[in-house]
């Protein structure tokens, strides 16, 4: 038969063991519960919306989002001749200019009119149609290649100005026909989507609405 002192010692050991077991169980529950919590926790939609708005603000600050650029070079002959009351040409008044006009076209999107809405990880961006942002001549290349002047119908500065305006018109028409604005639209979607996903995560989905011109 155990004496009172041994009984007290055994009870003390069992009590300590009980607390150890309980501590281990509580720790395990907290560990598993914490892991599950962090795996399934999503910040409130308001926080997601604020983050998306902050990212979108970076684009709006640019005013113009230049998507693509295209170099061009136009070489052509521009003849001129006086007429007799527009009835027939006066052949002895003919002149001509061989002119080269080179430059760079840039197309992009106006971000000042851009709008954005978000719903959780879904982002919708509304934009105006792309347009030609700039058409900058390369003056190191641009100029008269050959000039066939005529004292009876001399070439004037305003004639060259008219040739330049015609070259600008041709360069922009050719670029539009070649799909420059389609490329700008594709590039704008790619750039905006990349920034959102880089800043917020790959789970974000970006949709685009292009307004009618």
Image: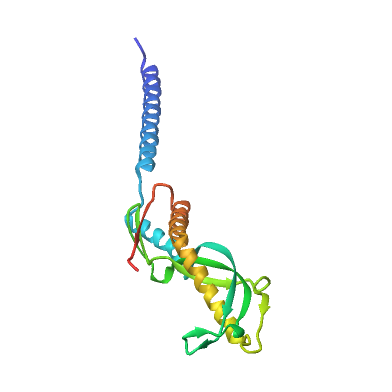
- Quadrant in which the C terminus appears: bottom left
Residue drawn at 54 percent across, 67 percent down: 105
* Left/right of residue 124 with respect to residue 179 in the rendered view: left
* Left/right of residue 203 with respect to residue 174 in the rendered view: left
Residue 171 in the image, given as x and y percentages of width and height: 52, 68
In-front residue for pair 12/102: 102
> Which of the 4 image quarters holds residue 140?
bottom right
> Which of the 4 image quarters holds residue 79?
bottom right
Tell me, yes or no, if residue 62 can be seen here.
no
Residue with the most extreme left position:
119
The correct choice, above or below, for 169 with respect to 16 in the image is below
Tell me, yes or no, if residue 42 can be seen here.
yes
Residue 180 in the image, given as x and y percentages of width and height: 47, 61
The correct choice, above or below, for 188 with respect to 148 in the image is above
* Left/right of residue 32 with respect to residue 73 in the rendered view: left
Residue 204 in the image, given as x and y percentages of width and height: 39, 50
In-front residue for pair 89/12: 89
Residue drawn at 36 percent across, 18 percent down: 7
């Amino acid at each position: 038969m155990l004496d009172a002192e041994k009984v007290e010692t055994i009870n003390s050991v069992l009590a300590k063991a009980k607390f150890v077991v309980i501590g281990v169980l509580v720790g395990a529950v907290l560990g598993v519960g914490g892991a599950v919590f962090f795996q399934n926790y999503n910040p409130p939609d308001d926080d997601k919306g604020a983050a998306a708005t902050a990212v979108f603000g970076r684009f709006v600050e640019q005013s113009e989002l230049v998507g693509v650029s295209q170099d061009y070079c136009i070489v052509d002959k521009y003849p001129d001749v006086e007429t007799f009351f527009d009835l027939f040409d006066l052949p002895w008044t003919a002149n001509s200019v061989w002119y080269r006009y080179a430059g760079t076209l840039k197309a992009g999107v106006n971000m000042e009119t851009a709008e954005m809405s978000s719903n959780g990880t879904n982002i919708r961006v509304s934009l105006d149609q792309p347009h030609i942002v700039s058409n900058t001549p390369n003056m190191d290349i641009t100029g008269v290649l050959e000039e066939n002047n005529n004292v009876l119908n001399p070439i004037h500065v305003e004639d060259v100005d008219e040739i330049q305006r015609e070259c600008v018109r041709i360069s922009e028409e050719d670029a539009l026909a070649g799909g420059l604005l389609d490329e700008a639209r594709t590039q704008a979607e790619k750039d905006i989507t990349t920034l959102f996903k880089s800043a917020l995560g790959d789970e974000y989905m970006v949709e685009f609405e292009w307004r009618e011109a």
